Image: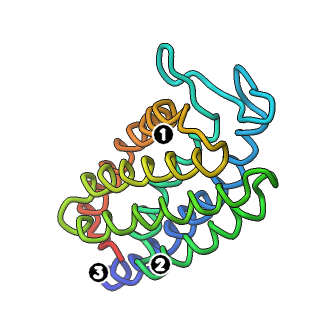
């Protein structure tokens, strides 16, 4: 029975990693679609906006980008740092390919730089303090993503506060899942990649 559990652990880790990778990839087209199609207000030649706090709005794509930062961490936890870097490269290409022409470079540059910042913070912290690593890396990544995207796409940081708050809400919503995953991994002996 011990041999079965030990051989099932790597396959379970790989299967979960592929699910996280798929979800990560899906956040990219979802963010690009949301920013141009969903919001309480759609600015002419600009993004569709959603309220993220009283008196504060953000482009609707923030919902997916906050989740993408956490999912990238989970991909790395399950499939390792090299696969995480491959996911970032593929995600950057997807972001450039799927973004509306007016924001293609902004989307790709913001995605690449924010995910690399997330990777740089998450990697050294994750073995000792997984949940803290997810929070810290995602917060750094979301600030980088917001500033780069808004500056390159719209030449303005008008929605920076809203972008940061909107993405932070999504990261905070994912923290209970990260804590549950950490506790479950410890309980069943599933070692991160």
The percent position of residue 136, horizontal first and vertical second, equals 29, 52
Image quadrant containing the C terminus: bottom left
Contact, mark 2 vs mark 1 (Cβ under 8 Å): no
Q: Residue at x 23, y 65 (%)?
A: 125
Q: Nearer the viewer, residue 5 or 168?
A: 168
Q: Is the residue marked by circle 1 packed among few (<14), some (14-19), or many (20+) residues within 10 Å?
A: many
**Residue 25 relative to residue 101: left or right:** left
Gap in Å between the C-alphas at discs 2 and 1? 32 Å
Q: Secondary structure at mark 1?
A: helix
Gap in Å between the C-alphas at discs 3 and 1? 42 Å
Gap in Å between the C-alphas at discs 3 and 2? 15 Å
Q: Residue at x 76, y 44 (%)?
A: 33
Q: Secondary structure at mark 2?
A: helix
**Residue 165 relative to residue 68: left or right:** left
Q: Which mark is residue 11?
A: 2
**Residue 161 relative to residue 149: left or right:** left
**Picture mark count:** 3
| Nearest-to-viewer mark from 3 and 2 | 2
Image quadrant containing the N terminus: bottom left
In the displayed structure, would residue 170 be above or below residue 79? above
Q: Is the residue marked by circle 2 packed among few (<14), some (14-19), or many (20+) residues within 10 Å?
A: few
| Nearest-to-viewer mark from 2 and 1 | 1
Q: Secondary structure at mark 3?
A: helix
The percent position of residue 3, horizontal first and vertical second, equals 33, 85
The answer to which of marks 3 and 1 sits earlier in the sequence is 3
Q: Residue at x 62, y 44 (%)?
A: 155
The percent position of residue 40, horizontal first and vertical second, equals 70, 20
In the displayed structure, would residue 154 be above or below residue 15? above
In the displayed structure, would residue 108 be above or below residue 2? above
Q: Which mark is residue 2?
A: 3
- Residue underneath mark 1: 167
């Amino acid at each position: 029975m011990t041999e079965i559990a030990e051989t099932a652990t790597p396959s379970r880790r790989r299967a979960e990693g592929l699910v996280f990778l798929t979800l990560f990839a899906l956040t990219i087209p979802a963010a690009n679609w949301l920013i141009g199609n969903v919001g309480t207000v759609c600015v002419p030649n600009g993004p569709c906006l959603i309220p993220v706090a009283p008196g504060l709005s953000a482009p609707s794509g923030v919902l997916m980008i906050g989740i993408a930062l956490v999912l990238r961490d989970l991909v790395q936890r399950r499939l390792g740092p090299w696969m995480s870097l491959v996911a970032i490269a593929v995600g950057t290409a997807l972001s450039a390919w799927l973004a509306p022409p007016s924001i293609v470079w902004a989307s790709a540059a913001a995605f690449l730089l924010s995910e690399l910042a997330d990777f740089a913070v998450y990697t050294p912290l994750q073995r000792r303090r997984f949940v803290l690593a997810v929070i810290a890396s995602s917060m750094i990544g979301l600030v980088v993503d917001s500033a780069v995207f808004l500056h390159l796409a719209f030449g303005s940081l008008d929605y920076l506060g809203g972008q940061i708050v909107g993405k932070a809400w999504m990261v905070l919503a994912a923290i209970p899942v990260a804590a549950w995953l950490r506790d479950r991994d410890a309980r069943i002996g599933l070692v991160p990649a």
